[in-house]
Image (cartoon, rainbow, N blue to C red):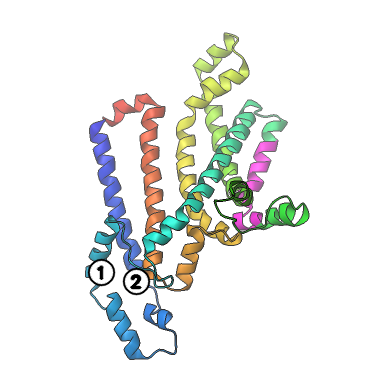
Amino acid sequence: MAPYLIRRLAGFAATLLAVSAVVFFVMNLLPGDPALVILGIDSTEDARAALRAQLGLDDPPLLRYAAWVRGALGGDFGQSYMFKVPVADLIRERLAMTLTLAVAAMALTVALALAAGVYAAASHGRAGDWAVMAASQVGIAIPAFWLSILLVILFAVVLRWLPPGGFPGWDDPAGAARALILPATALAVVQAAVLARVTRSAVLEVMGQDFVRTATAQGLPRRRILWRHVLPNALVPIVTIVGLQFANLVTGTIVIENVFYLPGLGRLVFQGIANRDLPLVQALVLLFAVAVVTVNLIVDLAYLWIDPRLKGRVG
């Protein structure tokens, strides 16, 4: 067990180092001059050259990368060109919004997918199964941003039940919750459609095993068999997809936050790209990459808790 954990943590560190190098050098290869963006087109070349020297943009790339990594390890990502404040402060200010939206969307995804997937498996070959599979196919085919527009038209414009966008702030918990319902739903529907299909397949596979037939022969209620015996034994592929989907939800907030005008990291990275704010974009892209790699690590470790038999194979 310990050697496996050491290997996974070493791989985690190596992956983060490789990701940081890719993020830094790709961002710095993009066309455009940050000094020109900051000072404007009316600035002189001497002024732009002086600003580039002040920002360290004339230093060798490897030297700049090493300095950036040292700062990132200490939580210092430099100062935003656009907002004129430390990037770390901007991230802390916007992080709660993005994490809350992603967690809410993930909770809704899991609730919808498990209910639909288990129901479809229990109704295999009947109308309920066909209905769930048809609905999931529609959900997969609908882009999240287009679904967002449809939800706004229906629930904000026509029914006037929910706000079409914006965020009132965390000081108003009820208003904040209402503002996140439509974005979380837009993120969750597509992911729930995928996860429902995976859940159905995993549950059907377990339902054909001997212990399920034994439980049925003993007269246990069908609901108890499905939820207490079948589903726990089908969790490995489900958890795999959940981990990947949570990473997708975190990065998917970039589009949804801009559609609903939410002050999160997704909107922040869009603003940073539009203004060629290298320190801000580099930090946010790295943060999203770290989230993806961390979730994958957690999923790998969760396998050992879900299925203790795996501990003997990884030791």
Q: Amino acid at mark 2?
A: Asn
The magenta segment: 131-148
Residue 259 versus residue 221: which sits nearer the camera? 259
Disc on the earlier residue, 1 or 2: 2
Residue 43 rendering spot, x and y as whole percentages: 40, 89
Binning the other alpha carbons within 10 Å of mark 1 as few (below 14), some (14 to 19) or many (20 upward) gives some
Q: Secondary structure at mark 1?
A: helix
- x and y percentages locating residue 68 in the rendered image: 28, 64
Residue 208 appears in the rendering: no
Judge depth for marks 1 and 2 and give the one in front: 1
Q: Amino acid at mark 1?
A: Arg
Residue bearing mark 2? 28
Whether tag 1 and tag 2 are in contact, CB under 8 A, the answer is yes
> Farthest residue in the front direction?
171
Residue 215 figure quarter: top right
Residue 222 in sight here: yes
- x, y (%) of residue 234? 49, 28
Q: Does 156 appear in magenta? A: no
Q: Residues within 10 Å of mark 2 (few under 14, many from 20)?
A: some
Q: What residue is shown at x 34% (from left), y 85% (from top)? A: 48
On-image quarter of the N terminus:
top left
In this rendering, the answer to whether 12 lies above or below 217 is below
Can you give x and y, in whole percent of width and height, for residue 306 in the image?
A: 41, 28
Residue name at image x 27 percent, y 49 percent:
13
Q: Please, what is the dominant secondary structure of the magenta stretch?
A: helix
Q: In the image, is residue 81 above or below residue 134?
A: below
Circle 1 residue: 64
